Image: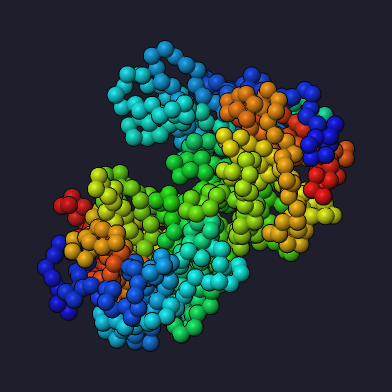
Amino acid sequence: MKRKKQWDVVHRWEGNPIIGLDDIPFRCSDICNAAAVKFNNEYILLLTIENMNGRKNLYMAKSRDGYRFKVDATPFIACSDEAGFHEYEKYGVLDPKITCLEGIYYITYTAAGSHGFRLALAETNDFKSVKKRGFISEPDSKGGLLFPEKINGKYVKLEMPGNGGRIWISYSDDLIHWGGYDAIMSPRAGFWDFHKIGPAVPPFRLKDGKWLLIYYGQKNTSAGSLSRIGAAFLDADDPAKVTDRTNIPIISPREMYERVGDAPNVVFSCGAILEGDNLLLYYGAARSCIGVGTTTVNEIIDSCIASEKEF
Amino acid sequence: MKNKNNIVLERCGRNPLVRPADIKPSALGFKVVGAFNPGAARYEDEIILLLRVAENCLPKTGKVRVPVYRFETEMGIPEVLELDENDPDIVLKDTRGVVYKGKDYLSSISHIRLARSRNGIDFTVDEKPFIFPCAPDEEYGIEDARVTFIDGRYYINYTIVSGDGWSTALSVTDDFEKHERLGIIFYPQNKDVSIFPEKVNGKYIALHRPNNAGFGKPSIWYAESPDLLHWGNHKCVVRPRENSHESLKVGGGSAPVKTNQGWLCVYHGKGDNSRYSLFALLLDLEKPWLIVKRSETPILEPEELYETDGFFPNVVFTNGMVERDGSLYMYYGAADETSCLAITSVDSLLSALF
């Protein structure tokens, strides 16, 4: 793969953006972000697309190489009209994250309805049919995701409740009832993640047992906010313990397609694929297209944590 | 005496039963400004109130003084932060607090204090706090306790306040001497939690009030739990109606009372001009997420001077109800300052609904 010379820890693919409005087989307003998974040798993205009427739905895109995708014409997960769902997701479904857990592919997504934003759960085995399991948070909750394995016998989730800009952890025996709430990460005054943070990509278990969490951080400026992506490492047995955290973003909006769009100066991720030590990060850019970049776990550790002072 | 709803609900002639002046401050330099929104429980032959005691600091010329908690080894130590009023790092917000060097300080902080009575009217207030801030996620105080007696133990839920806003935490006690913290059960923004006194369909049940900022108005939600610690299956149940009493929001009261017609609840509505009044609500016995009936007009609204005038005027707010000698003792906070009592009965409240 050819790389552009650049400063970010994540190296953008030179063919970026990989999915723009022209790649969508129907008219739509914008493309926000995408969950990512590798399934049966195919790369699958679940895109949040805002339709012309203002509602968001989740559409599947598939690729053999991870770079050239074909987008479906109909939603994989749409706002439901069913009783019990409609009032909670009638304004849209967005920000999907895919977690393979005990052999099932769980999709967590944010549902927007009459009563605010809630985290919802769906599952699939084949990425052909999908079953909605219902809502797993009260309002308001955004960015929610599941860990890919039980830890100390419990399912674990992360989310940003109350639009409060902090990342909270909780635990469950059954994926339905949640408790043990604790705020584990907060914005850092003066840093790139000064004003708001939220979980981005379901954590990866690394070789040494620790968890790699990709998260997003927001800094407000007089000309609007800047959304960037960073990483944190969580303790192997107690994921409520943040052991390290990047002092710089791993990717920031720099390219024109990240700077200009429906929401300017935004890179925002919901999905990445870890193959060995290589991380393939898919990200929404300026709420108008999808980009991809690569990095390695070691690069994240080296460039961000080991050399704090150099930045 | 029957009120507008044709129900018997009488204010106690001795109201207010507890006033700030009855309370000993929890630290030197503190002043009690509120003893309100009491949770209530029957314990042995006593009625115990769990008062929300709000304290600010005694004023001093030329100084800005605010209460703070310093946290040490899982304990909170109440202290006075004293600043020179000309300190350039101070930004005065309003009467609710100051910002100093970028950090918020509230002018008053609450804790939970017990008051005990044999007749439900004459209360003796404990000298020391019962539940007080012990960690940074409680640094701005502990408010509005509600007690539910389940399987022989008293579960107490309360609002914890911090930079994150409001969450609801749970404690349990057997003796009202000490309590064991069980952690946060509803994350921010969430308060006004009422836990039912028994399981329904094999699950513990609670009403809660998330502060959905995105769409709609804050409403009362239903949730269920296998263990009182993990909650799920949240559903929106009671939405504010389009009237002057509920125009801003609604929130649950004390633990619901089981009747043969359904679960009887008293909730509050925050209406025009931030006026709080109380309503009766009946939820289905087997499916408590379904409303059977809801009173059209308030069963209690601010009318007496101690309700219309005070720290925050025009508030009646209940989070403590106990049954005693066939009557229902509804304790309530008045004007965010004092604790009061209204006596009614289950039949009276049911008659307000049908």
Residue A298 screen position, x and y as percent: 24, 67
A5 on left or right of A110: left
Q: Is residue B83 above or below residue A246?
A: above
Residue A180 screen position, x and y as percent: 54, 55
Q: Is residue B27 above or below residue A11?
A: above
Choose between A307 and A119: the one closer to the eye: A119
Q: Residue at x 33, y 58 (%)?
A: A216
A258 on left or right of A149: left
Q: Residue at x 19, y 55 (%)?
A: A307
Residue B304 screen position, x and y as percent: 71, 25
Q: Is residue B341 above or below residue A237?
A: above
Choose between B79 and B289: the one closer to the eye: B289
Choose between B126 and B104: the one closer to the eye: B104
Quadrant for residue B6, please give it: top right
Residue sticking out furthest to the right:
B325
Residue sticking out furthest to the top:
B61
Choose between B273 and A221: the one closer to the eye: B273
Can residue B193 be seen at all in this image of the molecule?
no
A188 on left or right of B293: left
